[in-house]
Amino acid sequence: MGRVSPTSVSTPAYGATRPVAGITVLVLSTWALSTLDASGKWVMNAGVSLLMLCWVRYVLHLVLVLALVLPTRGLSVLRTIRPRAQIVRGSVMLLSTMSFFTTLHYLPQAEATAINFLAPLIVLAVAPWVLKEPARLSRWVAAGVGFLGVLVIIRPDAGLDTAGTMFGLLTACLFACQFIATRRVAVDGPFTTLIWSGAVGSVALTAALPFVLPAALPVLSSLSPLQWVVLASTGFWGALGHLLQIQAYRNAPASMLAPFVYLQIISAAGLGWLIWGQFPDPLTWLGIAVVCASGITIGVVEWRRRKL
């Protein structure tokens, strides 16, 4: 599982040499990551357990990234300046992955994705205490408005599963922690962080495999070839999504890409409709629009403030 990180809280701007290419690649990354989410939701509906899904997703992701990165960057890409911080970030990322896949098991993909975009607003709201940044009323207002948007999405008459809603809110909090942890490892290159995040999850899940595999074998043996392909594709889509995201920020500044991050909700809604026939109702779209507008607005405000 992966999210396109809202750039105002988690991703440095690498440059602005090819802005159109950067935007295009970022949009492609949103579709890749939404396809990862849809694939995970689909195979869980087929009976694949959460831990087995996460193991396949992490291990194949790590193998693909290493195969692509090591030949061009060498073993030096594995070195980190802050190994403890990388382990903490990888652990939080694993927990957020498991929490989000659980959310997807209960909620439509569009709603689950929209709730996640509360995460960067949470980070901005707690930044004065956690990141030692100046306290700003604009950030708290944006966080409050975004939360109101989420309340519209998860309103009682929306028909959303209560457990899924709770896991969705938990996932947003975990993603906020992940964004904060990403700040701690910003001294490392993005490929180093990507490899370490995959490695931490792979090691932890492989250690749990002896306890998970016996119960998972009957389900795995009953999977059709198509279901096996979709399960294996979770590693591919995860690796592709994150690699495209890194490339996007190498081509365009974070401030320019920030509004396009929210297009992931469109890809999530499109896949949810195509695969399960689930499409948000007008009131839910209003809540989604409020969340997106609050995030985009505070992103523009922060960008202008940095330029002054």
Image (cartoon, rainbow, N blue to C red):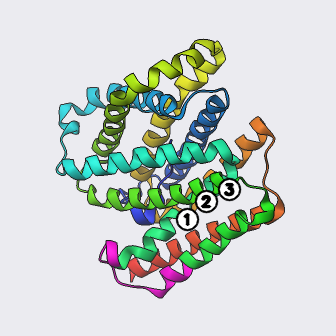
Query: Outermost residue toward the bottom?
Result: 137
For disc 1, the marked residue is: 118
Report the amino acid beneath label 3.
Thr
Contact flag, marks 2 and 1 (Cβ < 8 Å): yes
SS for callout 2: helix
> Label 1, label 3: how many angstroms apart (C-alpha)?
18 Å
The residue depicted at 60 percent of the width and 58 percent of the height is 166
Decide if residue 230 is on the left or right side of residue 187.
Answer: right
For disc 2, the marked residue is: 115
Quarter of the image with the C terminus is bottom left
User: Which residue is more in the foreground, 303 or 121?
Assistant: 121
> Label 2, label 1: how many angstroms apart (C-alpha)?
6 Å
Report the amino acid beneath label 2.
Ile
Q: Residue 227 appears in which quarter of the rendering?
A: top right
For disc 3, the marked residue is: 162
Report the amino acid beneath label 1.
Leu
User: Which residue is more in the foreground, 292 or 69?
Assistant: 292
Instruction: First in sequence, mark 3 or 2: give its number.
Output: 2
The residue depicted at 79 percent of the width and 49 percent of the height is 279
